[in-house]
Image (tube, grey):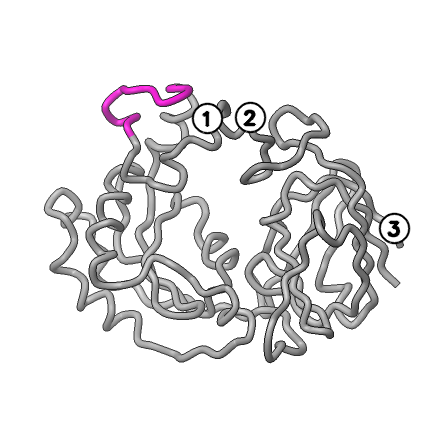
Amino acid sequence: MLYEGVLRKMQTELGSPIQYFLVFENDFLNMNQALNKQLKIEFIKYQCLNCGENRPIYRQGFCKSCFYETPAAGEWIMKPELSKAHLDQEDRDLEYEKKVQLQPHIVYLANSSNVKVGVTRKSQVPTRWIDQGAHEAIAIAEVPNRYLAGITEVALKDFVSDKTSWQKMLTNRLEDVDLVEWRERLKDNIPEEAKEFFLENNGETELEFPVLQYPEKVKSLNLSKTPSYSGMLKGIKGQYLIFEDSTVFNVRGSEGYYVGIDIR
Protein backbone atom coordinates (compact mmCIF):
# COMPACT_ATOMS: atom_id res chain seq x y z
CA MET A 1 0.00 0.00 0.00
CA LEU A 2 1.13 3.55 -0.72
CA TYR A 3 1.02 6.33 1.87
CA GLU A 4 2.06 9.95 1.38
CA GLY A 5 2.49 12.93 3.66
CA VAL A 6 4.79 15.06 5.79
CA LEU A 7 6.74 13.25 8.48
CA ARG A 8 6.16 14.04 12.13
CA LYS A 9 7.36 12.01 15.05
CA MET A 10 5.55 8.70 15.36
CA GLN A 11 2.67 8.59 17.82
CA THR A 12 2.80 5.78 20.35
CA GLU A 13 0.60 3.70 22.63
CA LEU A 14 1.97 1.91 25.67
CA GLY A 15 1.63 -1.84 25.33
CA SER A 16 3.54 -5.11 25.17
CA PRO A 17 5.03 -4.26 22.80
CA ILE A 18 4.60 -0.50 22.28
CA GLN A 19 2.42 0.38 19.28
CA TYR A 20 3.73 2.92 16.75
CA PHE A 21 1.74 5.03 14.30
CA LEU A 22 2.78 7.29 11.43
CA VAL A 23 0.07 9.94 11.16
CA PHE A 24 -0.43 11.90 7.94
CA GLU A 25 -3.02 14.55 7.14
CA ASN A 26 -5.45 12.13 5.54
CA ASP A 27 -4.21 8.74 6.70
CA PHE A 28 -2.34 6.86 9.38
CA LEU A 29 -0.24 3.73 9.45
CA ASN A 30 0.31 1.25 12.28
CA MET A 31 4.02 0.64 11.83
CA ASN A 32 3.97 -2.58 13.90
CA GLN A 33 1.99 -4.15 11.06
CA ALA A 34 4.85 -3.32 8.67
CA LEU A 35 7.36 -5.49 10.53
CA ASN A 36 8.92 -8.19 8.33
CA LYS A 37 7.67 -6.37 5.23
CA GLN A 38 9.52 -4.50 2.49
CA LEU A 39 9.22 -0.76 3.04
CA LYS A 40 10.20 1.87 0.49
CA ILE A 41 10.68 5.51 1.53
CA GLU A 42 10.76 8.17 -1.20
CA PHE A 43 11.62 11.80 -0.44
CA ILE A 44 9.32 14.11 -2.44
CA LYS A 45 9.79 17.61 -1.04
CA TYR A 46 10.17 19.64 2.14
CA GLN A 47 7.19 20.98 4.08
CA CYS A 48 8.07 23.20 7.04
CA LEU A 49 5.92 22.31 10.06
CA ASN A 50 5.28 25.99 10.72
CA CYS A 51 4.85 27.80 7.39
CA GLY A 52 4.15 24.75 5.23
CA GLU A 53 6.47 25.98 2.49
CA ASN A 54 8.82 23.79 0.44
CA ARG A 55 11.99 25.11 2.07
CA PRO A 56 14.96 23.06 3.29
CA ILE A 57 14.44 21.89 6.84
CA TYR A 58 16.89 23.50 9.26
CA ARG A 59 16.07 21.99 12.66
CA GLN A 60 13.14 20.35 14.49
CA GLY A 61 11.02 20.20 11.32
CA PHE A 62 11.23 23.95 10.67
CA CYS A 63 12.84 25.94 7.85
CA LYS A 64 15.59 28.29 8.99
CA SER A 65 13.47 31.45 9.23
CA CYS A 66 10.68 29.68 11.15
CA PHE A 67 13.17 28.03 13.50
CA TYR A 68 14.32 31.46 14.66
CA GLU A 69 10.78 32.89 14.81
CA THR A 70 8.29 30.30 16.04
CA PRO A 71 7.78 30.04 19.83
CA ALA A 72 7.75 26.24 19.41
CA ALA A 73 11.53 26.39 18.83
CA GLY A 74 12.54 28.81 21.57
CA GLU A 75 15.85 28.11 23.30
CA TRP A 76 14.00 27.08 26.47
CA ILE A 77 12.71 24.00 24.61
CA MET A 78 16.18 22.42 24.67
CA LYS A 79 17.35 24.29 27.77
CA PRO A 80 14.38 24.32 30.18
CA GLU A 81 16.41 26.20 32.79
CA LEU A 82 16.04 29.28 30.53
CA SER A 83 12.24 29.28 30.95
CA LYS A 84 10.92 32.67 32.05
CA ALA A 85 7.12 32.45 31.81
CA HIS A 86 6.89 32.04 35.61
CA LEU A 87 8.42 35.55 35.81
CA ASP A 88 5.88 36.85 33.27
CA GLN A 89 8.77 37.47 30.84
CA GLU A 90 8.35 36.82 27.13
CA ASP A 91 10.84 35.02 24.91
CA ARG A 92 8.90 34.92 21.62
CA ASP A 93 5.23 34.56 22.55
CA LEU A 94 4.32 34.81 26.24
CA GLU A 95 0.87 33.26 25.84
CA TYR A 96 2.34 30.16 24.19
CA GLU A 97 5.20 30.01 26.67
CA LYS A 98 2.86 30.21 29.66
CA LYS A 99 0.72 27.42 28.20
CA VAL A 100 3.70 25.08 27.87
CA GLN A 101 5.97 26.15 30.72
CA LEU A 102 3.43 26.71 33.49
CA GLN A 103 2.22 23.14 33.82
CA PRO A 104 3.48 20.17 35.83
CA HIS A 105 6.83 18.82 34.66
CA ILE A 106 8.63 15.60 35.52
CA VAL A 107 12.34 15.23 36.16
CA TYR A 108 13.22 11.61 35.42
CA LEU A 109 15.95 9.03 35.09
CA ALA A 110 15.90 6.80 32.02
CA ASN A 111 18.09 3.94 30.84
CA SER A 112 18.37 3.74 27.07
CA SER A 113 22.12 3.51 26.45
CA ASN A 114 23.11 4.53 29.99
CA VAL A 115 21.42 6.20 32.93
CA LYS A 116 20.46 9.76 32.01
CA VAL A 117 18.50 12.59 33.58
CA GLY A 118 15.81 14.39 31.61
CA VAL A 119 12.81 16.69 31.76
CA THR A 120 9.36 16.44 30.21
CA ARG A 121 5.85 17.71 30.74
CA LYS A 122 3.84 15.38 32.97
CA SER A 123 1.37 14.92 30.11
CA GLN A 124 4.22 13.43 28.03
CA VAL A 125 4.91 10.51 30.38
CA PRO A 126 5.61 7.79 29.23
CA THR A 127 5.72 9.14 25.64
CA ARG A 128 9.02 10.93 26.22
CA TRP A 129 10.62 7.75 27.56
CA ILE A 130 9.40 5.77 24.56
CA ASP A 131 10.75 8.41 22.16
CA GLN A 132 14.19 8.09 23.75
CA GLY A 133 14.22 4.31 23.44
CA ALA A 134 14.47 3.80 27.21
CA HIS A 135 13.78 0.24 28.36
CA GLU A 136 13.30 1.46 31.93
CA ALA A 137 12.59 4.86 33.49
CA ILE A 138 11.50 6.47 36.75
CA ALA A 139 10.15 9.89 37.70
CA ILE A 140 12.17 11.46 40.51
CA ALA A 141 10.46 14.84 40.93
CA GLU A 142 7.19 16.47 39.87
CA VAL A 143 7.47 20.25 39.80
CA PRO A 144 4.87 22.93 38.90
CA ASN A 145 6.75 24.57 36.03
CA ARG A 146 9.46 24.04 33.43
CA TYR A 147 11.99 26.33 35.08
CA LEU A 148 12.16 24.25 38.28
CA ALA A 149 12.52 21.10 36.20
CA GLY A 150 15.32 22.74 34.23
CA ILE A 151 17.40 23.86 37.20
CA THR A 152 16.97 20.40 38.76
CA GLU A 153 18.23 18.75 35.59
CA VAL A 154 21.23 21.11 35.45
CA ALA A 155 22.12 20.32 39.07
CA LEU A 156 21.93 16.56 38.50
CA LYS A 157 23.98 16.67 35.27
CA ASP A 158 27.07 16.96 37.47
CA PHE A 159 26.40 13.41 38.68
CA VAL A 160 24.65 11.64 35.80
CA SER A 161 24.60 12.05 32.01
CA ASP A 162 21.92 14.04 30.17
CA LYS A 163 22.71 12.41 26.80
CA THR A 164 21.77 9.16 25.07
CA SER A 165 24.05 7.25 22.71
CA TRP A 166 21.56 6.46 19.95
CA GLN A 167 23.94 3.93 18.38
CA LYS A 168 24.22 1.97 21.62
CA MET A 169 20.47 2.22 22.19
CA LEU A 170 19.74 0.76 18.73
CA THR A 171 22.20 -2.12 19.02
CA ASN A 172 20.60 -2.97 22.39
CA ARG A 173 23.90 -3.28 24.26
CA LEU A 174 22.23 -2.35 27.51
CA GLU A 175 22.62 -3.02 31.20
CA ASP A 176 19.75 -3.16 33.63
CA VAL A 177 20.30 -0.82 36.57
CA ASP A 178 18.42 -0.06 39.76
CA LEU A 179 16.85 3.32 39.05
CA VAL A 180 15.32 3.47 42.53
CA GLU A 181 18.84 3.26 43.95
CA TRP A 182 19.98 5.98 41.52
CA ARG A 183 17.05 8.18 42.62
CA GLU A 184 18.07 7.87 46.27
CA ARG A 185 21.71 8.52 45.41
CA LEU A 186 20.82 11.79 43.64
CA LYS A 187 18.23 13.03 46.15
CA ASP A 188 20.54 15.33 48.12
CA ASN A 189 21.74 17.06 44.93
CA ILE A 190 18.31 18.42 44.00
CA PRO A 191 18.23 22.25 44.35
CA GLU A 192 16.58 23.66 47.47
CA GLU A 193 13.75 25.22 45.43
CA ALA A 194 12.73 21.79 44.15
CA LYS A 195 13.43 19.50 47.12
CA GLU A 196 9.80 19.52 48.28
CA PHE A 197 8.76 18.01 44.93
CA PHE A 198 10.96 14.91 45.21
CA LEU A 199 9.02 11.67 44.64
CA GLU A 200 9.71 9.09 47.34
CA ASN A 201 7.77 5.92 46.65
CA ASN A 202 7.20 5.40 42.91
CA GLY A 203 8.70 2.51 40.99
CA GLU A 204 10.31 1.95 37.62
CA THR A 205 8.37 1.75 34.35
CA GLU A 206 9.59 -0.97 32.00
CA LEU A 207 9.12 -0.60 28.25
CA GLU A 208 9.01 -3.26 25.53
CA PHE A 209 9.81 -2.26 21.95
CA PRO A 210 8.68 -4.09 18.79
CA VAL A 211 12.08 -5.27 17.56
CA LEU A 212 12.59 -8.61 15.82
CA GLN A 213 16.29 -8.13 15.06
CA TYR A 214 18.84 -5.68 16.44
CA PRO A 215 21.77 -4.60 14.22
CA GLU A 216 25.40 -5.21 15.17
CA LYS A 217 26.32 -1.78 13.81
CA VAL A 218 24.08 0.96 12.51
CA LYS A 219 24.16 3.16 9.42
CA SER A 220 21.87 6.15 9.39
CA LEU A 221 19.56 6.99 6.48
CA ASN A 222 19.58 10.67 5.48
CA LEU A 223 16.87 11.44 2.92
CA SER A 224 18.66 14.59 1.78
CA LYS A 225 21.58 12.44 0.62
CA THR A 226 19.64 9.25 -0.20
CA PRO A 227 16.17 10.31 -1.40
CA SER A 228 15.02 6.75 -2.09
CA TYR A 229 15.53 3.72 0.13
CA SER A 230 14.02 0.26 0.33
CA GLY A 231 14.54 -2.38 3.00
CA MET A 232 12.84 -4.96 5.21
CA LEU A 233 11.62 -3.47 8.49
CA LYS A 234 12.85 -5.45 11.48
CA GLY A 235 12.13 -3.18 14.41
CA ILE A 236 11.07 0.14 15.87
CA LYS A 237 12.74 1.69 18.89
CA GLY A 238 12.69 5.25 20.15
CA GLN A 239 11.77 7.18 17.01
CA TYR A 240 13.88 4.94 14.76
CA LEU A 241 12.94 2.39 12.14
CA ILE A 242 15.43 -0.51 12.07
CA PHE A 243 15.99 -2.40 8.81
CA GLU A 244 17.44 -5.84 8.05
CA ASP A 245 20.57 -4.39 6.39
CA SER A 246 21.39 -2.40 9.61
CA THR A 247 20.08 0.87 8.15
CA VAL A 248 18.23 2.96 10.73
CA PHE A 249 15.92 5.88 10.00
CA ASN A 250 15.20 8.60 12.55
CA VAL A 251 11.59 9.63 11.88
CA ARG A 252 11.64 12.49 14.37
CA GLY A 253 14.94 13.73 12.96
CA SER A 254 13.26 13.87 9.54
CA GLU A 255 10.20 15.90 10.53
CA GLY A 256 9.19 18.29 7.76
CA TYR A 257 10.15 15.88 4.98
CA TYR A 258 7.24 15.08 2.68
CA VAL A 259 7.55 11.42 1.68
CA GLY A 260 5.90 8.53 -0.06
CA ILE A 261 5.93 5.19 1.77
CA ASP A 262 5.19 1.93 -0.01
CA ILE A 263 4.74 -1.31 1.98
CA ARG A 264 4.78 -4.71 0.30
Read off the magenta span: 84-94
Label number found at residue 253: none
Q: Nearer the viewer, residue 112 or 26?
A: 112
Q: In the displayed structure, would residue 2 be above or below residue 182?
A: above
Give coordinates of residue 233: x percent, y percent: 74, 68
Please name the residue shown 52% across and 30% down the image.
67
* Residue on which disc 1 sits: 71
**How far across and down, in percent of the image, does residue 242 sit?**
66, 67
The image quadrant that residue 103 belongs to is top left
Q: Secondary structure at mark 1?
A: helix
List x then y, in percent, for residue 109.
Answer: 33, 61
Graded by Cα atoms within 10 Å as few (under 14), some (14 to 19) or many (20 or more), the crowding at tag 2 reads: some
Q: Of circles 1 and 2, which is in front?
A: 2
Instruction: Check residue 93 for magenta coloring.
Output: yes
* Residue at image mark 3: 2
What residue is pinned by disc 2? 66
- Indicate whether 262 appears above or below 96: below
- Judged by its main secondary structure, the magenta piece is loop
- Marks 1 and 3, how far apart at CA: 34 Å
